[in-house]
């Protein structure tokens, strides 16, 4: 097989533990021509906001951008499902020449009249930024006439990276909270907000149940199974618990500055991190020792229920090698720990939005020889998956074809999946999927395996 080379300009974003001096580059725009796996600014914003189920989500731009929204997420709702719809102003060549503001205004009035949403988000795409439509002015006009919050999301794709989309979404969310805020500033005892949890496959419900059993009230989840009215009381929480740190830490910082709410970063993936997340919240309410007692009992009960099956699967999976490429580095930390519980080694790990601090931690967690990548592309992923002879690739929808073309198992750990992988229940689901995939005899029949015999 012909060797796959790395683009010269990309070499500072690839690190091999044990043989390279650690000075990985990150937080930079994707290299033109490298066909990055990273998503655009618009994608980052819709990842955060789309799970708000009773809001209207309108993409202002060509129809192609809206194709990135139609029911592609596993974000479930316990009630309204307006978030599953895909609406676009479908800008054409004529609109680009003469402007799309009138078309946007008309679309908003029609959709609000038909669907009666509690709020509306308007996502500005690349072409809107180029032609200069005043999206904020149109939103303000429509809001004045309809009486619901109509919020511009400044998510023009060319403005930066997926991280900039997160920031645009956080700005819109904070704006929504500010407009719907309850008058009472008093804190609600034993209450938290969960930030960066999107209810993929119903994970929000699992996590909220843990906190209920601990005696903790969840005021709002941003944004899984989200409702506009719930954000109005979010300023009264005692603590913000940030699950997806890459996407919602900026909002947590804004809420701390405006409302005095401290925040902690957690992860609900894997036994270790789920347990630690619950213990960290219980520790915050140190004046209530009964909370910690309930938490310890909960963790003990949940771990005891899944440990025997995990041990059985570990027998088959010990020594197997996994490649991990995900959006945020915090998820990668949890996956490395979860795979170690199954006896597996991570030989490649990367993210779309990791920071210097994130990659330094990844370096400490990984074994010598592990490849660490920032903002990878398909050729790089293929190169190192083959070099390391991985048995499993864990990623998202864009990584699935790479894995299958190379003849190795794949586990979807992104927003498109339909089963929960968070919490203790999620850990057993994850382990079963990994076990079924890695041990499938079909991988012995792929050409690459035959060449290596």
Image (cartoon, helix red, strand yellow):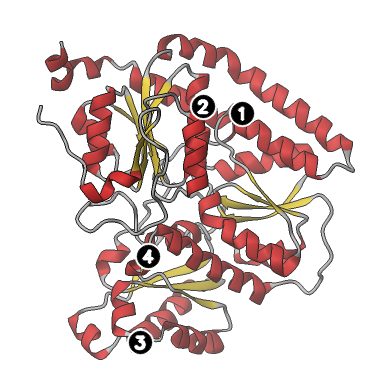
What is the number of the mark on residue 338? 2
Q: On the image, numbered disc 3 is attached to which residue?
A: 101
How far apart marks 1 and 4 lie (CA) works out to: 34 Å
Q: Where is residue 93 in the image (x, y as percent from the top left)?
A: 18, 81
Answer few, some or many: residues within 10 Å of disc 2's Cα (few below 14, many 20 plus, some between 14 and 19): many
Dot 2: element: helix
Disc 1 packing (10 Å; few <14; some 14–19; many ≥20) = some
Upstream in sequence: badge 1 or badge 2? 1
- The residue that mark 1 highlights is 272
Q: Is residue 401 above or below residue 232?
A: above
Above or below, 10 relative to 431: below
Q: Distance between the residues labelled 3 and 4?
A: 24 Å
Left or right of 292 in this view: 365: left
Which residue, given by chain and number where applicable, does mark 4 sit on? 160
Q: Do the residues labelled 1 and 2 touch (CB within 8 Å)?
A: yes
Q: How far apart are marks 1 and 2 (CA)?
A: 8 Å
Residue 428 locus on image (x, y percent): 52, 25
User: Sequence-wise, which precedes: disc 2 or disc 3?
Assistant: 3
Residue at x 50%, y 40% (from the top left corner): 360
**In the rendered view of the protein, which quadrant contains the N terminus?**
top left
Counting residues from the N terminus, which is met first, the one under dot 3 or under dot 4? 3
């Amino acid at each position: 097989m012909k060797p796959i080379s790395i683009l010269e300009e990309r070499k500072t974003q690839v690190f091999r533990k044990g043989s390279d001096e650690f000075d990985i580059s990150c937080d930079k725009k994707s290299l033109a021509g490298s066909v990055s796996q990273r998503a655009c600014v618009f994608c980052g914003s819709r990842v955060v906001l789309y799970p708000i189920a009773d809001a209207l989500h309108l993409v202002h731009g060509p129809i192609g951008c809206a194709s990135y929204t139609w029911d592609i997420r596993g974000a479930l709702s316990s009630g309204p499902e307006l978030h599953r719809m895909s609406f676009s102003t479908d800008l054409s060549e004529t609109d680009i020449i003469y402007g799309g503001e009138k078309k946007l205004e008309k679309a908003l009035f029609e959709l609000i009249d038909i669907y009666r949403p509690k709020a509306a988000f308007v996502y500005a795409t690349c072409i809107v930024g180029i032609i200069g439509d005043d999206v904020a002015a149109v939103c303000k006009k429509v809001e004045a006439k309809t009486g619901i919050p109509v919020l511009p999301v400044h998510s023009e794709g060319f403005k930066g990276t997926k991280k900039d989309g997160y920031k645009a979404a956080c700005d819109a969310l904070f704006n929504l909270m500010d407009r719907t805020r309850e008058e009472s500033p008093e804190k609600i005892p034993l209450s938290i907000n969960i930030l960066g949890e999107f209810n993929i496959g119903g994970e929000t419900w699992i996590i909220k149940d843990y906190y209920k059993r601990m005696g903790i009230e969840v005021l709002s989840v941003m944004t899984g199974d989200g409702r506009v009215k719930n954000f109005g009381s979010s300023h009264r929480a005692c603590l913000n618990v940030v699950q997806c740190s890459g996407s919602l830490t900026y909002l947590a910082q804004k809420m701390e500055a405006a409302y005095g709410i401290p925040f902690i970063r957690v992860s609900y993936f894997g036994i270790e991190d789920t347990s630690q997340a619950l213990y960290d919240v219980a520790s915050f309410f140190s004046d209530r020792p009964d909370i910690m007692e309930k938490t310890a009992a909960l963790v003990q009960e949940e771990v005891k229920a899944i440990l025997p099956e995990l041990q059985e699967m570990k027998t088959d999976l010990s020594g197997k090698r996994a490649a991990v490429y995900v959006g945020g580095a915090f998820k990668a930390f949890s996956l490395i720990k979860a795979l170690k519980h199954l006896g597996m080694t991570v030989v490649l790990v990367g993210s779309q939005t990791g920071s210097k601090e994130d990659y330094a931690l990844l370096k400490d967690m990984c074994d010598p020889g592990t490849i660490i990548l920032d903002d990878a592309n398909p050729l790089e992923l293929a190169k190192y998956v083959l070099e390391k002879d991985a048995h499993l690739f864990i990623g998202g929808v864009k990584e699935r074809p790479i894995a299958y073309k190379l003849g190795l198992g794949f586990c979807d750990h992104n927003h498109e999946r339909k089963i929960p992988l968070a919490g203790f229940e999620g850990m057993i689901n994850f382990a079963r999927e990994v076990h079924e995939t890695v041990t499938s005899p079909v991988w012995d029949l792929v050409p690459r395996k035959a060449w290596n015999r």
